[in-house]
Image (cartoon, coloured by chain):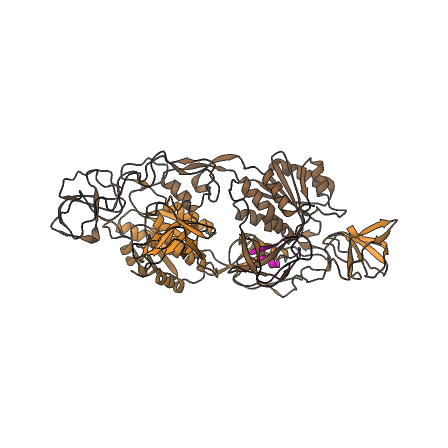
Chain colours: A orange, B brown
Amino acid sequence: MIAVKNAIQIIESTIRSQKVHSKKVVKVLNQVLAEDIVSPIDMPPFKQSSMDGYAIIHSEEGQYQITGEVQAGASKDLTLKQGEAVRIFTGARVPESADTVVMQEHTSVEKNVLIVEEVPKKGSNVRPQGEQIKKGEVALQKGTLLKQAAIGFLAGLGIEEVKVFNLPKVSILITGNELQPPGKKLKKGQVYESNSITLKLALKNLGINKVTVEHVKDKLGATTKVIKKHLRQADVVLISGGISVGDHDFVKEALERNKVEELFYKVNQKPGKPLWFGKKDEKVVFALPGNPASSLTCFYVYVLPALKRMMGHRDMHLPRKTATASEDIRNKHRKDLFLKGIVNDGKAKVLIGQASSMLRSFAICNALLMIPADQEVVKQGEAFQYIQLP
Amino acid sequence: MIAVKNAIQIIESTIRSQKVHSKKVVKVLNQVLAEDIVSPIDMPPFKQSSMDGYAIIHSEEGQYQITGEVQAGASKDLTLKQGEAVRIFTGARVPESADTVVMQEHTSVEKNVLIVEEVPKKGSNVRPQGEQIKKGEVALQKGTLLKQAAIGFLAGLGIEEVKVFNLPKVSILITGNELQPPGKKLKKGQVYESNSITLKLALKNLGINKVTVEHVKDKLGATTKVIKKHLRQADVVLISGGISVGDHDFVKEALERNKVEELFYKVNQKPGKPLWFGKKDEKVVFALPGNPASSLTCFYVYVLPALKRMMGHRDMHLPRKTATASEDIRNKHRKDLFLKGIVNDGKAKVLIGQASSMLRSFAICNALLMIPADQEVVKQGEAFQYIQLP
């Protein structure tokens, strides 16, 4: 049995980022950029008006002869002389010979003569070509998380494709003969299987949609065969259940038969002790405890960081924050506890129903409160760390 | 022109939650529950072992005769007498006549006789029927945000469908004759259109995938007709650009011709001043400024909260948090500022490139720093509010 922090270290030192792949920018939301992006154009690509108004050659004069108009999108370049003005609109190309745009609100027009009530400073309301970025400059650096604004920025530079780290393909293998799919009538002794749904949706929230779920009979031969198949097709194999000490738990032996190297087994934590982690070549396997709350806790603490590292994220772990206990929290177990809790305004409350079989508290919590193995009690008002859940 | 807080109030008092719809639980990730869910079963549905071990009738005896075995999933009910033990596994049904499970690790077996090294307390390692939740109890309340754990919890109760608030259908209408799709070669005077991409991806991050994008010519007739069509098919119409004072800005008049009631126009903020908000029956329209940073700022401050309210979220606004300024932040504009910034460990830094045409800072920021209109400077070290971006 190893400590939580050692288990995390092993994962950090084992996992590598995925291969890199070119994708359309509209398809890479929440993925991580795998190359520096250089701007292919000046932005704006021409001297651009930032207002509706009139382009002039700057002077202290109050009157100008209106000689033309440039609409947004028009490519023509009108030539101005001193004392002339050109009607112009937001986003339109400012004539090369003009240097200033007077806001429409500060003008009036009488018989084609523009009267300027307030002369702005030279250069006002004109965006110089390349003001935001120049052709050849780095627009976004490798490692940038591509949210909507980043993708919009790239699209605005005319960029259609970028290299990103591949999303891992994940297989979820469900063991446990007692498990029935929701919708079936339960016989005595059976329960509904929910881990595949919880894990699949947790993966979806990470942007991972290539997920295969397979249910496995609690037999050594069947388990060995199914693991072999998914080691071929997936980057990450998550196995739910079958990793304890019972006579019908075949996962550990099936992993050995598939020559998956064990990197750790059993972590000094509650819930989630019987966690197994290993690798075979580039593939990694997490054998998660079958109890729903144990499974999801291990997902947040170990699997999610591994996946984020594979996806190229700089911050692989969920945020660790500090809260104060709103009442004493006891730890009789000499294990690291991950308690379902609610943190509000920096105050943390433990929810009722912490058993590893129970998802009820997980369904409404926003934090996993972390009580270290060597701390018997967190006193009311005492500060401690928690994981902020997504 | 109205104040930011008044604009927000108008939106809060205008927007209603969407109609309610039954959907498969596997399809409602990140939606909001529109009904109280009552558990259809006891959970666990039977007296269940939480360990691999031996079921006994509790006594202080150290030896028991092993008389049978119950695997997980088996429905049979073995009858025990005092002094007998039944081999049992995690998740399996504990015989009605047994009351305690001894962990396998605390036992040894000799010729079918179980030797218990450490007798646990009566009731140990047995989950009573209905321990987590009883049939008829409320499992989740109306208004619960359905993340993976909540959906897993419902699936574990055998629930297949739930009522959720409908996701709004959104139309994005793009005005601006100067705009070209990425991939085309730009003529002088043209720029790439990115607002439709940014907005569509921002909607996707909210779980809204039913989004229609249409580009509109800067003509009154065309704009009027396209708005009419989208008022029929969408719940929310977002219009990008064409709402300023220029001669080619037809959006405001086209909205009037469609009898969309104006609820506010122009907000005392930078960027994003020329924001228009209105409604027609149940439909709402946001006419967003065309500049990319203005558009996205208005999305986060006004549109996203409106959509979340429609989707039934209790917390409609993005989180407002407090940070301290890492250097003086000036506000010369007598407007509420929303500055792209980075907040790290409670310290806020303003990014370079705040012009409303620029997405470069938006692409890498994690916060919108809020500087009130009546505050000329936030001093270094002074606390102020920011919006935490998703």
Please indicate, yes or no, whether residue B186 appears anywhere in the rendered image: yes
Identify which residue, A285 or B239, lies in the foreground.
B239
Identify which residue, A8 or A37, lies in the foreground.
A8
Can you give x and y, in whole percent of width and height, for residue A315 in the image? 47, 60
Can you give x and y, in whole percent of width and height, for residue A347 in the image? 44, 51
Image-based side of B222 in relation to A36, left or right: right
Please indicate, yes or no, whether residue B181 appears anywhere in the rendered image: no
**Where A378 sits versus B278, above or below?**
below
Instruction: Specify the segment rendered in magenta.
Output: B359-380
Can you give x and y, in whole percent of width and height, for residue A215 in the image? 34, 46
Image-based side of B385 in relation to A295, left or right: right
Q: Residue placed farthest to the right in the image? A: A111
The image shows a total of numbered marks equal to: 0
Can you give x and y, in whole percent of width and height, for residue B347 in the image? 54, 61
**Where A162 sits versus B93, above or below?**
below
User: Which corner quadrant holds the N terminus of chain A?
Assistant: bottom left
Identify which residue, A359 or A152, lies in the foreground.
A359
Image-based side of A239 in relation to A143, left or right: left
Residue A363 within the segment the image draws in magenta: no
Query: Quarter of the image holding residue B77?
Result: top left
Identify which residue, B53 or A195, lies in the foreground.
B53
